[in-house]
Image (spheres, rainbow, N blue to C red):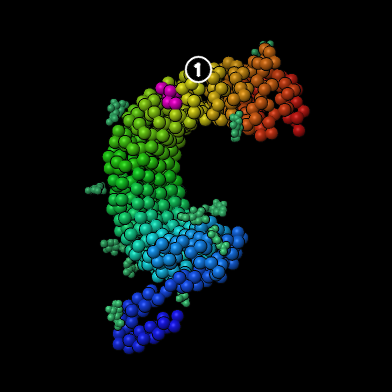
Amino acid sequence: MQRTRLLLSSIILMLVQSCSIYIYNLTVAVAAETDITTDQSALLALKSHITSDPQNILSNWSTTTSICSWVGVTCGARHFRVSVLNLSYMSLTGTIPPHLGNLSFLVELRLRNNSFHGTLPQELAYLHRLELINFAYNNFITGEIPSWFGFFPKLRNIDLGGNQFSGIPTAFFNLSTLQVIDLQKNLLSGGIPRGIGNLTMLKEINLDFNNFKEIPNEIGTLDQLEILFVQWNALEGHVPVSLFNMSSLSTLTLIGNNLTGSIPDNICQHLPSLQDLNLAYNQFDGPLPSKFWQCRQLLALKMSGNNFHGSLPTNIGNLTQLRGFYCGYNYLTGTIPHEIGDLRNLEILTLGVNNLHGLIPSRIFNVSTIIVLSLGLNQLSGSLPANIVLGLPNLQQLLVGKNNLSGVIPHSIFNASKLTTLDIAANSFSGFIPRTLCSSTNSFQWLNLHTNNLRIDTSTPEANILSCLANLRNLTSLVLQGNPLNATLPVSFGNLSSSFQYFDISICNMRGNIPMILET
Ligand SMILES: *[C@@H]1O[C@H](CO)[C@@H](O)[C@H](O)[C@H]1NC(C)=O
Ligand SMILES: *[C@@H]1O[C@H](CO)[C@@H](O)[C@H](O)[C@H]1NC(C)=O
Ligand SMILES: *[C@@H]1O[C@H](CO)[C@@H](O)[C@H](O)[C@H]1NC(C)=O
Ligand SMILES: *[C@@H]1O[C@H](CO)[C@@H](O)[C@H](O)[C@H]1NC(C)=O
Ligand SMILES: *[C@@H]1O[C@H](CO)[C@@H](O)[C@H](O)[C@H]1NC(C)=O
Ligand SMILES: *[C@@H]1O[C@H](CO)[C@@H](O)[C@H](O)[C@H]1NC(C)=O
Ligand SMILES: *[C@@H]1O[C@H](CO)[C@@H](O)[C@H](O)[C@H]1NC(C)=O
Ligand SMILES: *[C@@H]1O[C@H](CO)[C@@H](O)[C@H](O)[C@H]1NC(C)=O
Ligand SMILES: *[C@@H]1O[C@H](CO)[C@@H](O)[C@H](O)[C@H]1NC(C)=O
Ligand SMILES: *[C@@H]1O[C@H](CO)[C@@H](O)[C@H](O)[C@H]1NC(C)=O
Ligand SMILES: *[C@H]1O[C@@H](CO)[C@H](O)[C@@H](O)[C@@H]1NC(C)=O
Ligand SMILES: CC(=O)N[C@H]1CO[C@H](CO)[C@@H](O)[C@@H]1O
């Protein structure tokens, strides 16, 4: 300390000669003279600003041990100075003291998910070695992100998500080394600043859950950008053309905005790396893009909740990597192309709430990877194949309600060990509800059979499915209403699983008395 003070006073003498030299050499002198005890006082200053530490974590910060062994502290191997401070997820409440700016060797500062509040001290701008800042999910003071955030010459990763920031200063776009920006869940609004186009090293941008209105054309200059999330904002108007022209982009998620216009037919020609495209719940219209053979990498295509019309392109069969295709809640017409059977990796197919007609292509029932098949609220006809479970061993949800389907319920469907949700309501299914419903292997939670022509076989007590429903331990909802069941409720019926919440047989032409337990 003494030596530092001497040095400083000799420099102050020089101040008389030249102010600029003074500033330069002061910086050099202080940096040279700080040591591990400076780091210790900075951390102890932080500790003294913590007002609540319910997990008693900072009791570990004892002055009798080296700060390099303190919880959350990592020292550099070469210089034994604090290089990482990670206090994330420690339930701490408090403020950040200016002393933290003295941790001059700090490379990573992680304070995610605590209750730090107040202002961020400007002294943090002295941390010129910082490569990563994570202040996400705290309660820092509302207002613009401080402009001194522009001073970190090596910053690669910044996460300020889950705070109350309402603006981004111009200086922020001086952070030319940035690769990852996460500003999700703040109060940001207006246009995304054009300066974003200057951050040409960016690989990932997350602006979810703000109120941004516009994506600037400048975003197209980010030729290393791989991930762009701007979901659930207030984006409106057309997507800038430059956005559909980014050679590195693999994930584009714009769900939950108010974007309009149509999607370029050759979208994948200029987005050759695209893997996950999520444009759901906007106001896009026009036909679906069809040059799908250009989308070699595409894994998920999410277009639900728009105004797309026209038919499903047969080229869908070229998306051979596709795992999820979501296109419900649109105005699609025509039939489901049988080429959909070429999607050998498909896990989720949702086409519900459109105007599709014709048969469900039989080849769908051979895509063994399918987990969710959702085709309800269309005008599809035909029946379900008898061996449906053989072809779809992974099926968990089958939703085909409100179509024009007919025939019997395949017996095998209730032998499916993974199926939890079946909705075949409001069709013209007929015959007996298969006795396999009571199969001990089935895992049904939600079963909706209402408004069909189904009956319950009461020829023998064993055949009556109503006597075995109590075995279905996971069943929470069974709707049989609107079927001419013509059956008796057995006494054992009262013995249903405690998870059973909803049973609707109101218009089912039931005979006999309702057991007492159901009346209470
Ligand atoms: C603090 O925690 C670290 C790691 O859990 C441990 O190595 C160290 O001994 C602890 N120090 C004290 C003083 O409890
Ligand atoms: C930071 O600390 C938290 C809580 O101890 C831990 O879960 C997390 O993995 C750490 N992060 C890093 C990058 O070390
Ligand atoms: C913050 O941490 C708590 C538990 O410590 C957890 O319940 C909560 O989900 C976390 N929030 C975020 C946004 O990570
Ligand atoms: C921009 O960054 C450079 C170096 O990283 C720094 O010298 C300059 O002061 C910064 N300007 C602003 C406005 O933040
Ligand atoms: C972005 O770069 C251009 C050209 O280099 C420059 O004129 C402009 O001031 C920069 N914008 C910001 C916000 O840094
Ligand atoms: C697309 O990008 C290429 C090069 O990256 C550029 O030459 C072309 O002008 C861009 N087109 C549009 C419409 O932005
Ligand atoms: C979308 O725009 C319409 C018409 O301008 C408006 O009524 C609606 O509230 C907007 N929705 C959202 C989510 O911004
Ligand atoms: C696209 O799929 C069709 C069959 O649906 C096939 O004939 C064609 O070769 C595929 N094109 C490419 C480029 O894979
Ligand atoms: C019932 O649900 C539990 C938990 O969700 C699951 O572990 C179990 O396998 C299910 N039972 C059957 C018969 O599928
Ligand atoms: C209803 O069931 C009873 C007894 O099983 C049978 O005699 C009768 O024919 C059935 N009614 C109809 C309409 O199928
Ligand atoms: C560094 O932090 C400032 C506050 O920003 C303190 O006033 C200084 O005393 C401290 N310096 C040292 C060497 O700990
Ligand atoms: C006046 C003075 O001491 N200037 C020095 C400041 O630091 C630089 C670099 O270390 C020296 O070259 C100057 O002599």
Q: Quadrant of the C terminus?
A: top right
**Of the residues shown, which amino acid type is indicated by label 1?**
Ala
Residue located at (30% from left, 87% from top):
17
Position of 102 with respect to 472 (left or right) is: left
**Position of residue 342 measured from the top left corner of the image (x, y, whole percent):** 36, 26
Q: Of 224 and 107, which appears nearest the observer?
A: 107
Dot 1: what SS? loop
Residue 227 versus residue 371 in the image, above or below: below
The residue that disc 1 covers is: 386
Residue span colored magenta: 363-368
Q: Residue furthest right?
A: 516
Position of 414 with respect to 29 (left or right) is: right
**Position of residue 306 measured from the top left corner of the image (x, y, whole percent):** 42, 39
Residue located at (35% from left, 76% from top):
28
Q: Main secondary structure of the magenta part?
A: helix
Badge 1 local density, few (<14 within 10 Å), some, or many (20+)?
Answer: few
Residue located at (70% from left, 15% from top):
461
